Amino acid sequence: MTDSIRRVKQVIAPQTVIEGADVLLRRSFGPQRSNLFDPFLLFDHFAFNDPLEGPIQGFPTHPHRGIETVTYMLRGSVRHRDSLGNMGIIGPGDVQWMTSGRGIMHEELPHRDPEGIIQGFQLWVNLPAAQKMSQPRYQEVSAATIPCVETPESLVRVVAGEYGGVKGPVTDIAAQPIYMDVTLQPGAEFSLPTRTQDFAIAYVFEGEGVFGGGESEPGEFITAVKMLVFDEGDEIRVQSGPASSVRFMLMVGEPFKEPIYPYGPFVMNTQAEIQQALSDLRSGTFVQ
């Protein structure tokens, strides 16, 4: 059996949504009971770059249960604090991988850089039923500690997973994810072996390139800004245009194949578990 290149089976144009305290976001997908992006639940691209938006209010204190939230900053910063007493700044190039587990209350307050720009991403990753009520934890990763695989034609920042023999610093995640920031100069190529059963998506946010092409079949030409869903296969291939670079976030993970019941900041497996989360909030036992 020969290896198969993953084809692009769906192209999603992000939609503008408002979350938190009137925060403008580009959302590619959000939690749904259909669970089509298993193990991923949500992907948002945030950028507060229009002075007409006024002061940034951010995301005041709110709960999470049953998921992992991943914040990756490109420009600007986010100050966070939570019910466990954690507090810090997520700056350019930094990553925060938060496992909410049984429950956490936290807030995220974005701040512009000196040029008045904020840009970054938030990814939600599901937890399997057996880990949804686990202890909350953080993996805080500074930009300086994220390894890069660099050539004259490409730059790959490896947050989770492995590329070119280099492993990312985020570990011990149930979905065994790959999470990478990939930049290709004009005419460059990128390839990554994947497990056939894993789910794979890419968020193209700069430039243009050909995704999913092989020796016998042409790939799909994609221009930013788009979310791509790959079909099953053993390898992801990307080639930038002859005169244009391309930059994208690549996410690959093992599906849990469990039913989900999302409700706002909670993603559990059943409606009864959502009702229990709401009851815990009302009774003051949500955070222990």
Image (spheres, rainbow, N blue to C red):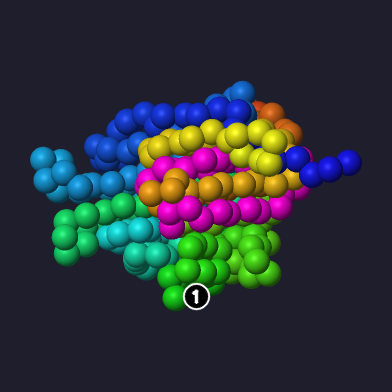
Q: Position of residue 2 (x, y in %)?
A: 84, 43
Which residue is painted at 31% across and 52% down in the image? 119
Other residues around mark 1 within 10 Å, as few (<14) / some (14–19) / many (≥20): few
Residue 112 higher or lower than 28, as above or below = below
- Of the residues shown, which amino acid type is indicated by label 1? Thr
Residue furthest to the bottom in view is 144
Is-magenta flag for residue 198?
yes
User: In this rendering, would 41 be left or right of 117?
Assistant: right
Q: Is residue 268 visible?
A: no
Which residue is painted at 66% across and 33% down in the image? 217
Q: Identify the residue position indicated by label 1 in the image.
A: 145
Which residue is painted at 60% across and 51% down in the image? 101
Residue nearest the observer in this picture, 122 or 128: 122
Q: Position of residue 166 (x, y in %)?
A: 64, 70
Magenta-tinted stretch: 185-212
The N terminus sits in image quarter: top right
Residue nearest the observer in this picture, 8 or 16: 8
